[in-house]
Amino acid sequence: MDNPIDETNEPLSEPDTAASDSRAETAVPRAYSSRTLPPLPAPYTAPAALPPAPAKTPILALLLSVFPGLGQLYNEQPAKAVTFFFFVVGSIYGTATISPFPFAFLIPFSWFYNLIDAWSSAHDINRRELAGGRPRKDHSMESPIWGATLLGLGLVLLLNNLGWLNLARLSRFWPLVMVVIGAIFLSRALKARDASAPARDSFDDRAL
C-alpha cells in the first residue's frame, strides 16, 4: 500500500545552476565607497613673539617738555636738558634786562624747539634699540655742541653782568647772526650738491 504522503510530496528539484550562473555573470559588482578620513591637524607652530615694548614714550617726552628740559631728562640726555632750560631762562633774562629785541623772539623758538627735540629724540632712541639694542644710559648720543652752547651762553651773560660786554649796544648787530647762519647753510648745500653730482666725462658729447 502506497503512502499518500509520498504521493503528494513532489520530488525535490535540483537547483538551476545554469540560471544562477548566468545571473552571477550579469550581476554588476557592488561598489563600496571608501570613507574619507578627516584631514590631519595643522602642524604646531609656536606663537609669534610679541614685539618688545618701546624704551621711551614720545608723547610722554613731549608733555614733560612743557617745562623745558624735563623731556630731555626723561630721554636720559642731561646735557641737552640743562642747555634747553638755561637757553629759555637766558632768553627771558635778556628780554627783561638787556633788550626786548631780539631776545623776545628767542623765547618761543627755544621753547618749541625743546618740545620737538624731546619728541624726535624719543623716537630715535626707540629705533636704535629695535635695530641693535642700544644701552639704556648712553650719553655718547649727546653731541658736544650742547655743552659748548651752554658754555658760550654762560660766558656771554657773565661778561654782560660784569660790564665787560654791553649786549644792549650789540643788539643792533643781531642781523649778523642771520648772515653767519645763512652762510653756513649755503656752504653745506653747495658741498652736498657737489658730492651728489655725477662724475662728468672728459669731453662734452652734446650736439655742437
Image: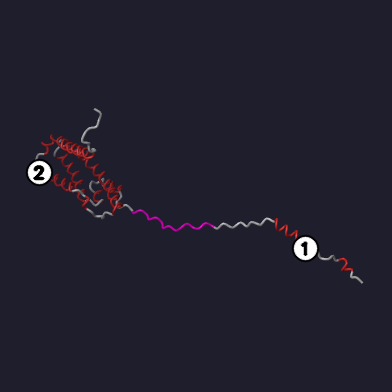
Q: Considering the numbered disc 1 on the image, is that residue within a helix, a strand or a loop?
A: loop
Is residue 100 visible in the rendered image? The answer is no
**Closer to the camera, 91 or 97?**
91
**Mark sitting on residue 15:** 1
Q: Which residues are magenta?
A: 38-52
**Residue 30 in picture, x, y percent from top left:** 66, 57
**Residue 177 in picture, x, y percent from top left:** 15, 37
75 in relation to 15, above or below: above
**Residue 57 in picture, x, y percent from top left:** 30, 50
Q: Residues within 10 Å of mark 2 (few under 14, many from 20)?
A: few
Say what amino acid the circle numbered 1 marks: Pro
The stretch drawn in magenta includes residue 49: yes
Q: Considering the numbered disc 2 on the image, is that residue within a helix, a strand or a loop?
A: helix
Tag 2 residue = 159
Seen at 24% across and 32% down, the residue is 205
State left or right for residue 163 relative to residue 135.
Answer: left
Say what amino acid the circle numbered 2 marks: Leu
Residue placed furthest toward the right:
1
103 in relation to 9, above or below: above
**Closer to the camera, 39 or 22?**
22
In this rendering, the count of numbered labels is 2
Question: What secondary structure is the magenta-colored segment mainly?
Answer: loop
